Image (tube, grey):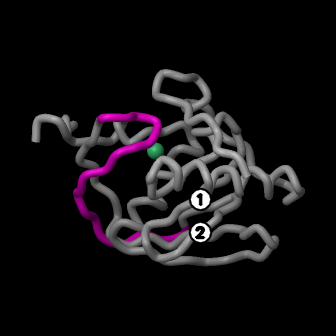
Amino acid sequence: MASRLIRKVGEDVLRKKARPVDQIDNKILVLLDDMVETMRAANGVGLAAPQVGVLKRIVVIDAGEGLLELINPEIVATEGAVIDVEGCLSIPGKMGEVERPAKVTVKYTDRTGKEVTATGEGLLARAFCHELDHLDGVLYIDKAKRMIDPDEE
Ligand code: ZN
């Protein structure tokens, strides 16, 4: 496993639409391992492949409920709405208030090729939305109702 360079806001790769994974080969498994290592080294809750410069529909999340590795994830249901603060490893030193669904169900393929459905609430629901947005070139700063400078709080 190797930690990869996290791309920062302003880099084109963060604004492009990622392509679906059609085959889970060794390259994809290595990418998943590297993404997990990169997320953990940065103390992140989630990381999307475009954030390490790879335009593939892959996300890793650990919101304190166990590691999830999502290939070709799609949101299939949402419920409610919550405004809370979030940040992004690609936008260091900033936070913003973003409205997200309170409960989110996603469908994805895991690393073994199995189709999985998972439902998250709170931080996990927020992470699903935030990370899946990355796959379409969307950043939370596009949706934030208010930006917060953590140094001024
Ligand atoms: Zn992010």
| Camera-nearest residue between 108 and 41 | 41
Give the position of the C terminus as an image quadrant.
top left
Please tell me which residue lies in front, 152 or 101: 152
Q: Is residue 46 magenta?
A: no
Q: Secondary structure at mark 2?
A: strand
Task: State the image coordinates of residue 141 (x, y, percent, origin top left).
Answer: 34, 36
Q: In the image, what residue occupies the spot 43% across and 72% down?
A: 64
Q: Which residue is mark 1?
A: 60
- C-alpha distance separating marks 1 and 2: 6 Å
Q: Is 84 rendered above or below residue 106?
A: above
Q: Earlier in the sequence, mark 1 or mark 2?
A: 1
> Which amino acid type is shown beneath numbered disc 1?
Val
46 up-or-down from 66: above or below: above
Q: Main secondary structure of the magenta part?
A: strand
Q: Find out whether the residues at labels 1 and 2 contact each other: C-beta distance under 8 Å.
A: yes
Quadrant in which residue 80 is drawn? bottom left
Counting from the top left corner in percent of width and height, residue 121 is at: 37, 74
- Relative placement, left or right, of 146 versus 11 is left
Q: Is residue 83 magenta?
A: yes
Q: Residues within 10 Å of mark 1 (few under 14, many from 20)?
A: many
Give the residue drawn at x 72%, y 70%.
110
- Residue drawn at (79%, 53%) of the image: 30
- Amino acid type, callout 2: Leu
Name the residue tied to disc 2. Answer: 68
Which region is colored magenta?
Answer: 76-93
Q: Secondary structure at mark 1?
A: strand
Q: Position of residue 78 (x, y in %)?
A: 42, 69
Q: Residue 6's quadrant in the figure?
A: top right
Report the residue at 58% width, 39% height from top.
51
